[in-house]
Image: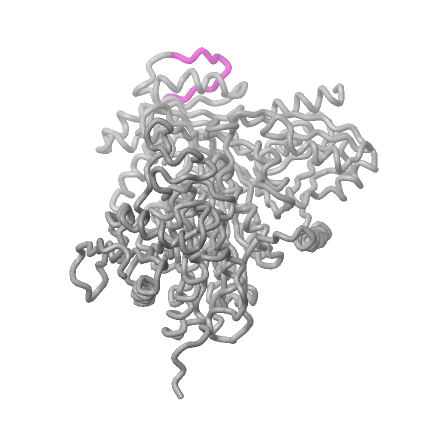
Amino acid sequence: MTEKTFMAGFGGQGIISLGQLWVYCGMKEGKEVTFFPFYGAEKRGGVARASVIVSDHEIASPLVTAPDSAVVMNMDSLPLCEEVLKEGGTLLINSSLVKVETRRKDAKVVKIPCNELAEQIGEVKIANMVMMGALSKVTGAVKLDKLEAVLKTFFPESKHKFIPMNLKAIEAGMAAVK
Amino acid sequence: MAEEKRLMKGNEAIAEAAIRAGCSAYFGYPITPQNELTAYMAKHMLDKKRVFIQAESEVSAINMVYGAAAAGARTMTSSSSPGISLKQEGISYACGADLPCVVVNVARSGPGLGGISPGQADYFQSTRGGGHGDYFHIVLAPKSVQEAADLTYKAFELADQWRMPVMILADGLIGQMMEGVIFQPAIDPASLPRKPWATGHQADTHREINHISSIHLVPAELEASVRARFKRYDQIKAVESRYEEVNVDKAELIMVGYGTSARVALGAMELARKQGIEVGLFRPITLWPFPDKRLGELAAKGKRFLSVEMSMGQMIEDVKLAVNGKAEVSFYGRCGGMIPTEEEVLAEIRRILKK
Amino acid sequence: MELIYGHPKSLKPIQTKYCPGCGHGVIHRIIAEVIDEMGVQERSIITNPVGCSIWSDLYFDFDSVQPAHGRTPAASTGIKRMLPDHLVICYQGDGDLAAIGTAEIIHAANRGEKFTTIFVNNAIYGMTGGQMAPTTLIGQKATTAPYGRDPGEAGMGYPIQVCELLATLGGTKYLARGSVNNAANIRKTKQYIKKAFEAQLRGEGFTMVEVLSACPTNWGMQPVQAEEWLEGNMIPFYKLGEIKNTLAGSEGGTASSSTNGGAK
């Protein structure tokens, strides 16, 4: 198993955190992982992108050029993801912000209203965690079981109070995949 | 028992490994894409009461390293391409004065200010003695976060053993990406043996006085000193050249690549195999000394080579020297911060092999 | 019997290569005397700069480190940070300190690096053969200012008063300017050096003693004439005295520069 995922959104949507937590959980489940962010000269704003790979064996290029799956967190990211997604790959679309249909007819499309689900839980910022739950359910690359214990080692002590909310978001994302 | 695997950026892993290797003084200046390294050192050197200075320039930073090395410390600086150009003065002096230190280049793309995206266009500068004068120093090229950490320990050891600067030549991708890494145990700097040639602590032993210098104004003396250093280079070439080989026996074509390019080449190799094409990878880990002997052996077996680089073709010159006309050597490279893709490299393989 | 005069232990008993009338030999001697008096020969380290005093490691009988031109304060920073209980002497000329190494001296001083800079100001480049220095006086001739230093039309800039320049920086604790043109000034300069070295070993902060020194060869003068020129031209512009003294136990931070030039 090797799952290459391309993630894109706008700065502030937590693309980097999503990618990092995804590979961290993968690593804790015994997988080989790489995470490569697109880094720009500016620190804020613009499009945030990350290439992540989770695999059962040694990973060759950390650069994801033909992803098996792509996470589309906002409208601007859709064309980017459509361009790189491999033939027959999966598009995971945040349908709260992406209201158009994809032109990639070959793709498997999974729509998750990440923002709405996150708001229902109480915090729109955790829309990225909703997406992570969906990504796990759809790809199976990272199981996200024993998640609570893993999150405790990922977040510093001062952020532990947010773990239950994050768990809820992830579960909501998993449940949203039909 | 081995320590737990941690998820870290390459920049941070190099910093952590340096601290564990007993680095007691770090001097740096901000430049992208290696800033996480400097920030990590600031945080973790200061809390261990070790020396961290944000210098006024790369020039000052390498000369602080020169001073700390002259005082016998394990010391390091890091930068990225334009900053490494500035450090070349100090590196030349350190080579001339036989001072051990570690210099990390998280390379970007040039020339000039260029871009901040990953590059391998500093190969010539790193492997040919990038400053003035007749000299070389060891250059280590990691391909992953784990290897970046492992080679950092090695760099400090080699620097002390051979009394020379050792460069770690990474690139923006190695520096910025996160992977799992397991660290070796930490060395207490105080437990490291004192260097008898270094300045300081004369009162403890009443030894003869020590001079750290690169000056020899008498040509015959300078020649003798350079020749002695080149004898040491021969010993280094004999024992320190490192490389990794994948599938070279079965391969119709062997790709040669280091660092990030080697990872891409490995991916291209996997894609090729799915199409029934057997290619291999030869990955130099030491860029100086370049593992030319082994490459020459492979050339003698009738292999063909493809140098894959993030430059317009620099390492290919070492590949050609190593095969010495016995084999055909092709080139595929991207530059300007572009990273070659596995698919592009595969296409080049098919073009060369006409498959 | 008490020995009242002899060759300092910290200075090797050999003849220097310096030209007749050059100040480096005297400056070396008073540094060595102070080190002997303090009893720190075996924990002293000098950084000998690019310039005529690159030879100082031949003469001082203690460890030395020879850095690149102008980088002397950066190298001294590295040494002193690793060996905080050693006496680190950053020996610099005017080209090394006030031209190519301007960034290094300002930032080392500003960080309050705890070494002592001995700044030998002879208003000329010596080793390379008499080029204009940052401290060359207006109208003074040099091979690269053949008609005299002209800050106006020729745009050669003005002589830099280094002590005064550094005095504004928080890290500087002791900045004094002496001269080795006569016995009285030599004695005073030695006192400045001793004060600076003692402050260094107490870890107080950045200390520097600027020393006005003659270069008869490149000034194109006889040694005696050169001392007269120094007194008549350099001292009126580069005021002697303690330019800044905020050391513990000193009287506040006010500058106490004396204007009585020659101290006859």
Left or right of B135 in this view: A170: left
Quick check: C236 above or below B210? above
Please identify the quadrant where the C terminus of chain A is shown: top left
Q: Nearer the viewer, residue B296 or C224?
A: C224
Q: Nearer the viewer, residue C88 or A98?
A: C88
Please state the horizontal and vertical placement of residue C64, each as a whole percent of the image.
49, 61
Please identify the quadrant where the N terminus of chain A is shown: top right
Quick check: C244 above or below A65? below
Please state the horizontal and vertical placement of residue A112, each as a whole percent of the image.
35, 24
Please state the horizontal and vertical placement of residue A53, each as a whole percent of the image.
50, 34
The residue located at (35%, 53%) in the rendering is: C228
Quick check: B198 above or below B241? below
Let me know if residue B86 is in the magenta part: no
Q: Nearer the viewer, residue C124 or B39?
A: C124
Left or right of B199 in this view: B244: right
Give the tally of numbered discs.
0
- Spot the residue most to the bottom: C1
The rendered magenta stretch, by its main secondary structure, is classed as loop
Please state the horizontal and vertical placement of residue B100, each as a whole percent of the image.
55, 55
Q: Quadrant of residue B36?
A: top left
Q: Nearer the viewer, residue C236 or B329?
A: C236
Q: Quadrant of residue B134?
A: top right
Quick check: A99 above or below C137? above
Left or right of B304 in this view: C19: left
| Image: magenta residue range | A101-111
The answer to whether any part of residue C90 appears in the image is yes
